[in-house]
Image (cartoon, rainbow, N blue to C red):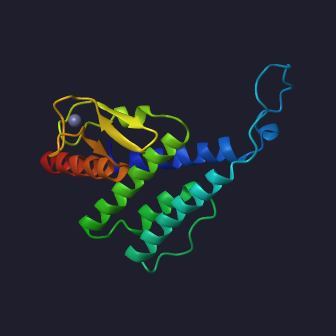
Amino acid sequence: MGDSEDRHTAAARLRLLQQEFTTPAAQRDPSPRTPTNRPPAAPIDLGILDYMAASVAEVIEHTRTAAPDAGPAPAEPAAAYEWMHQNTADAAPEQRSVRDAMVFRQSLKHALAMGDETVIRREPCPRCACWSLFWRHTTRVAACVNRGCVDRCGRPSTWVLAQLAERHVAARNARSRTAT
Ligand SMILES: [Zn+2]
């Protein structure tokens, strides 16, 4: 899985979030509903709007720092990833790694915002390398269920999304170094 796939996934998830949470239900689904016990459709989710704006602002800020000559950011939120990539293609390797980890972290967050926690289970635990992570809603960390995988104080290993994203990008960079 390359960085192009990661940024396309991040963009697709952001578009889906926008579609699902910021489009009034009547526009999403014009077919007449039969009466059911379903709760009324949620109104536009302002929290998601703020979340999306913050995500795009982070992408734009990174781009402007790495490439002060970058032109105007695209109007469509999800297009910001491609715009950042094009403007930072020549950045230093460390800066590209920071960029790629940010994109992957955001992509994980977009999926979690949609209620998809399988994205966490698809990442190996950075400490024991097992496929043993699950998402803890309350504390918003990925926790390892492997009993032998504990920190120095004997507590179960937990990771924030930024740590998973850094590991993901570092592992991919290592693979691409050995492949060339
Ligand atoms: Zn572990």
Query: Residue 78, image x and y in percent?
Result: 56, 54
Q: Nearer the viewer, residue 101 or 139?
A: 139
**Farthest residue in the bottom direction?**
69
Q: Nearer the viewer, residue 91 or 160?
A: 160
Q: Quadrant of the N terminus?
A: top left
Q: Nearer the viewer, residue 46 or 100?
A: 46
Q: Residue at x 16, y 51 (%)?
A: 177
Q: Residue at x 59, y 61 (%)?
A: 53
Q: Nearer the viewer, residue 80 or 90?
A: 80
Query: Residue 110, image x and y in percent?
Result: 51, 46
Exactly how many numbered labels are in the figure? 0
Vertically, is 63 above or below 175?
A: below
> In which quarter of the view is residue 108 placed?
top left
Q: Residue at x 22, y 29 (%)?
A: 146
> In which quarter of the view is residue 42 placed?
top right
Q: Residue at x 38, y 68 (%)?
A: 88
**Farthest residue in the front direction?**
153
Query: Residue 81, image x and y in percent?
Result: 48, 58
Tell me: 122 left or right of 21.
left
Tell me: 146 left or right of 36.
left
View quadrant of ligand 1: top left
Vertically, is 118 above or below 166?
A: above
> In which quarter of the view is residue 131 placed?
top left
Vertically, is 106 above or below 30?
A: below
Query: Residue 126, image x and y in percent?
Result: 22, 42
